Amino acid sequence: MKIIGAKDAASLVQPGDNVFVSGSGGGHCVPQAVLDAIEARFLETGTPRDLTLIHAVGIGDRKLKGAACFRHPGMLKRSVTSALIDSPPLIALARDNKIESYTLPQGVIAQLTREMAAGRPGLITKTGLHTFIDPRQLGARQSSSAREDLVELIEIDGEEWLRFKPLPLDVVILRGTTSDEDGNITMEHEAIPGEMLSSAQAARRQGAAVIVQVKRLAKRRTLPAREVKIPGIFVDYVVVDPEQKQTYATAYNPGYSGELRVPLDAMVRLPFTERKIVARRAAMELRIGAICNLGAGISTGVSAVAAEENILDRIVLTNEQGYIGGAPLTGVDSGAAQNFDAVVDQPYQFDFYDGGGLDVAFLSFAEVDPQGNVNVSRFGEKIVGVGGFVNISQNARKVVFSGTFTSGGLELRCVDGQLKILNEGRHKKFVSSVEQICYSSRFASEQGRIAIFVTERAVFDITPDGLRLIEVAPGIDIERDVFAHMAFRPSVSEKLVTMDVRLFDPAPMGLAEDLRSAPSGARVPRRSLPG
């Protein structure tokens, strides 16, 4: 192992290389100093060019950091990730067909690193079947120049599976907190574990160079052995950046790294807006003991509602980055969590998700068609990607899709328990057909899984005939405020009810008492003690 500067690390990346980068969202475990140096080298010398950039989930500050460091013309040939939303310049490159763009499921990329480490022939999974990931649809492509097949349909014992092919690696750039003189890496200040070990092992398997950016150095054999996340045998180079921040927005918060627990009243509360109304109604689907996932966007508000309602200790919230228990964060630092009970590497979290471990998943939606198919990945020129959406929605027992009814300028007000629409959003979300299928309602139904759609003014479920209205907010006229802003007319339940009036009052709802009287959401083990 050698300790080198970021500039020397950048020189290790050669034209045409396949570069894997760690991290998540707004700076969690992103080796930004090395990425900055690679960008600076390109701007100064015009090299390295024609790179393939691989990262499991979106990385960036939604401006010019993270994956956006590779935005310069000629620098990037191909992007393989699950999400582009954190790096808008790459969205433009994919949209304009200037790069080959693929958005694979987050769990697939994370788990694939482990398969590559073992030299296996890729990842075989059902995740992605009957969605735009399926090669019978788009094969995860987001640009027409992306012609190589990264996924193929196979059959095993009469069942359909997808095989995601191994990705070649030349340089793997990771991040930790501390390195000793032998390159053993610990992550005590990091907010997420990622897939550090698996990707380092995959690099070793393929003979790729492993560069790890850290905040500080320690003397040989002084790090607690059990705290070492990346053993030095997998590390070739270490770059020390004393200014390394925990995230782009936060220099260091010990609550993010699990070094302390914060009082619940210190957690940020949601302002009383349409987003909080949606999060509150979604939270009403919680049950004692249920194991849940909170996706990105509006659904992250469920944890803030659970904290405010003092029910966090009665449920188990998780997120795809590896956290179990506690409260996943909202806002610029989403992806991390506070007061968690455990954290596991991202590939193992997705093993649990893919295996059906989730009782309820809370996910956002952007487009819904009459059958209940959902699109979150692409809308014309806006390419978002899917993150962990496909893994989660395809395998949870129940999915609560959440979103405002319309978007773009929506304004409303709650008066005396009544919802009033002051200004309707410009964009309809309930459309005649979705641009890309990220959730197949037919496939979910065949597997016995259920879903509901929660908005601030109406709630829908799915029947064999398609979407059905089951709840409407007080003060809302169904024809004027609901059907008039849908591209299709759903059926209406014979048992249509009014949404809970408590949703439209800023005072706490008393969900703790509701949970006490609700049936348990925990699964009963196949074998248990009598009584």
Image (spheres, helix red, strand yellow):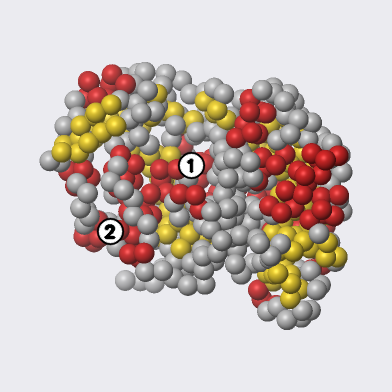
- Whole-angstrom CA distance, mark 1 to mark 2, is 26 Å
Residue 226 horizontal side relative to residue 327, left or right: right
Residue 79 in percent (x, y) is at 71, 36
Residue toward you, 312 or 290: 312
| Quarter of the figure with residue 28 | bottom right
Crowding near the residue tagged with mark 1, few <14, some 14–19, many ≥20 C-alpha atoms within 10 Å: many
Count of labels in the image = 2
The structure residue drawn at horizontal position 56% and vertical position 49%, both measured from the top left corner, is 26
Residue 190 in percent (x, y) is at 60, 63
Residue toward you, 350 or 156: 350
Residue 64 horizontal side relative to residue 35, left or right: left
Residue type, numbered disc 2: Glu
Residue 219 in percent (x, y) is at 77, 79
The structure residue drawn at horizontal position 58% and vertical position 53%, both measured from the top left corner, is 248
**Residue labelled with disc 1:** 393
Residue type, numbered disc 1: Ser
**Residue labelled with disc 2:** 309
Q: Earlier in the sequence, mark 1 or mark 2?
A: 2
The structure residue drawn at horizontal position 20% and vertical position 39%, both measured from the top left corner, is 414
Asked whether disc 1 touches disc 2, contact meaning CB atoms under 8 Å apart, the reply is no
Q: Quadrant of the N terminus?
A: bottom right
Is 484 placed above or below 520 here? Answer: above
| Quarter of the figure with residue 457 | top left
Is 510 placed above or below 430 here? Answer: below
Residue toward you, 186 or 411: 411
| Quarter of the figure with residue 244 | bottom right
